[in-house]
Amino acid sequence: MAAHLREQIMTAAIRPGEHIRMDETAEILGVSVTPVREALLTLRGEGMVNLAPHRGYVVADMSRTDVEDLFWLQGEIAVKLALRTADAITAHQLNELESCNERLRASLASGDGAKVADAEFEFHRLHNLIAASGKLSWFLLSATRYTPAQLYATDPEWGEVAIDSHSRLIAAYRAGDRAEIVEQTRRQFTDGASRLMRHLENAGIWDTPEETDDTDRR
């Protein structure tokens, strides 16, 4: 539930300043109010929603800097993990990564966003396991939950970049090219940041507010 609302907030499906009504959200999603309440408490702890007196939960502001910082943090952690992976990866594990990338390619061709998201997750899960850095991988996973996976998974251009970046990363591991490893690791995060930034700009969440009616959503 928290993941669903987090994705909606990060893609501006629910915009800064809008109310999230627990009863309406529960009805839309076909659940009881309890998991919605628990999800909103989680999001409040993350600073994604605020509790306004007598008004309920309101989506917090999200700046361009917030988005940039999220992807910068992810990229820095990912680079550290990639360099540790470079020191440990075996030929068999490289073949496994190639198989994961082919699964991503097939999923992208199918047009099934859920399969694309799963294949992308599996590639990075396997990759990060090789680094044998459990805490660092956990921090990266915690940071990447703010990236809207379905937004990317339904974007064929993003998918092509991901597949190409994975291929180049694997080749860099085979060649022992640490500079290329760093470049390809950062590439996906800079690409993801620019795509999300463009999406949010098109959604108009950073436009100058105009006079509108006070219509609540969800």
Image (cartoon, helix red, strand yellow):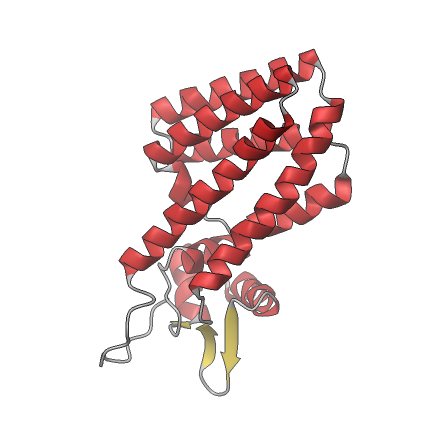
Residue 186, placed above or below residue 172 = below
Residue at 67%, 17% (x, y): give it.
93
Residue 110, placed above or below residue 25 = above
The spot of residue 42 in percent (x, y) is 60, 64
The spot of residue 33 in percent (x, y) is 51, 66
Residue closest to the eye, 135 or 21: 135
The spot of residue 36 in percent (x, y) is 52, 63
Residue closest to the eye, 84 or 95: 84
Question: With 155 as the anchor, is 124 left or right in this view?
Answer: right
The spot of residue 128 in percent (x, y) is 67, 33
Which quadrant of the structure image shows residue 183?
A: top right
Residue at 63%, 50% (x, y): give it.
142
Which quadrant of the structure image shows residue 46?
A: bottom right
Residue at 44%, 57% (x, y): give it.
10
Residue 205 visible in the picture: yes
Which quadrant of the structure image shows residue 25?
A: bottom left
Residue 43, placed above or below residue 173 = below
Residue at 51%, 32% (x, y): give it.
120
Question: With 215 as the anchor, is 131 left or right in this view?
Answer: right
Residue closest to the eye, 192 or 218: 192
